[in-house]
Image (cartoon, rainbow, N blue to C red):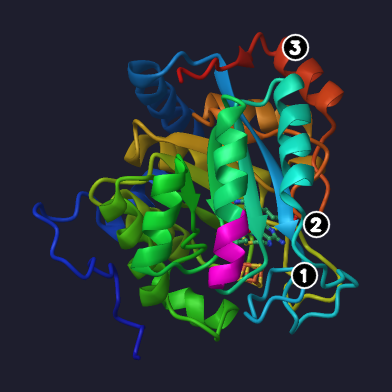
Amino acid sequence: MNTQTIEFIRPAKKAATPPRWSVAEVEALFKLPFSDLMYRAQQVLREHFDPNAVQLSTLLSIKTGGCSEDCGYCPQSAFNSTGVEDRKMLEVNAVVEAARAAQQKGAGRFCMGAAWREPSDEDMASVVEMVKAVRGLGMETCATLGMLTDEQTEQLRAAGLDYYNHNLDTAPEFYGSIISTRDYRDRLDTLERVRKAGMNICSGGIVGMGESLAQRAGLIVQLANMNPYPESVPINNLVKVEGTPLAQAEDIDPLDFVRTIAVARITMPEARVRLSAGRQQMSDAVQALCFLAGANSIFYGEQLLTTGNPDVEKDRALLDKLGMYPFAEKM
Ligand code: SAM
Ligand code: DTB
Ligand code: SF4
């Protein structure tokens, strides 16, 4: 596919309304004077949310390593030699215990991640049990399992899954430089299935992979023009893992990361914008700017999937220092 000229990949079914954002408009947001951008992002945040309440999600890797996809950023790809071992899926009880512990520490949402291209039927039977049990604790549930069929999507919905995470990761025209074992259309198809089944969508991307500003804007355009756009938008700062092709990628300027959060907030006003991977490498000051830019969700707990995240005490201290508090979920 010649991707040079693609600005926006339309959903398979034509959206009823024209795309809300063009790449040029989103690029113009990125280029605003920093204070103007922050001001707009704060205005939008305050129109839709309590600006001091942060939603807390805890991640658990329920199936780690040995993944058959070749994602250039990922420590769990079998194509990358990162030392992450291929483990078997966790038992349902172990997952429920981890969810209970996360809940006791104040997490409202529990996200179960698996290093799969797609789940098998056998995998699905266990995941369905996990979702039911975690939901039984009174937590919001999220899963990220790779591509789904219609039937699998329906199984998750019936189990009570609240959110399905499936990231677009980057702009369509940069995608082939990062991943070759699937294409953008595959991602959009799964997202459309999730939407059709009536579940909430969690979809975002990674910055700091060597993308251009236009490509960073291109990712936001794809997300913001989904109709409706995702309820939850994780913005990850690439965690550079030795043994992945992106281990030596150049660091993104922290202020450009903050700008990405602000642009996500302005273009997707009602979404939870999550300041996601990469917080362990970020100063308190940059995280505070991300909140100012409209981030209102974080991953909470010492571990992401295979890499670290700030510990709970450190995050509590940061939120206290900023006068912020956990968002209480309405169940
Ligand atoms: N295998 C499933 C998939 O790819 O959809 C679910 C798990 S996968 C690890 C979930 C997401 O983690 C990816 O889409 C990517 O956005 C993020 N991710 C993986 N490695 C990362 C890294 N090194 N830095 C930042 N984000 C990363
Ligand atoms: C998301 O956007 N980021 C999370 C979650 N959704 C699944 C994953 C981050 C993974 C970082 C690398 C790792 O820990 O393996
Ligand atoms: Fe597999 Fe997901 Fe990692 Fe890609 S991001 S290698 S699909 S676990």
The boundaries of the magenta stretch are 120-126
As drawn, 205 above or below 241? above
Residue matched to label 3: 321
Identify the amino acid type marked 1. Gly
Report the side of 222 relative to 311 (left or right): left
Identify the amino acid type marked 2. Thr
Residue matched to label 2: 306
Residue matched to label 1: 65
Report the side of 10 relative to 91 (left or right): left
Identify the amino acid type marked 3. Lys
Which secondary structure is most common in the magenta stretch? helix
Residue for point 30% across, 46% down: 198
As drawn, 294 above or below 200? above
* Badge 2 or badge 3: first in the primary sequence: 2
Tell me where residue 117 appears, x and y as whole percent.
57, 74
Asked if the beta carbon under badge 2 is closer than 8 A to the nearest atom of ligand 2, the reply is: yes
Label 3 sits on a secondary structure element that is helix
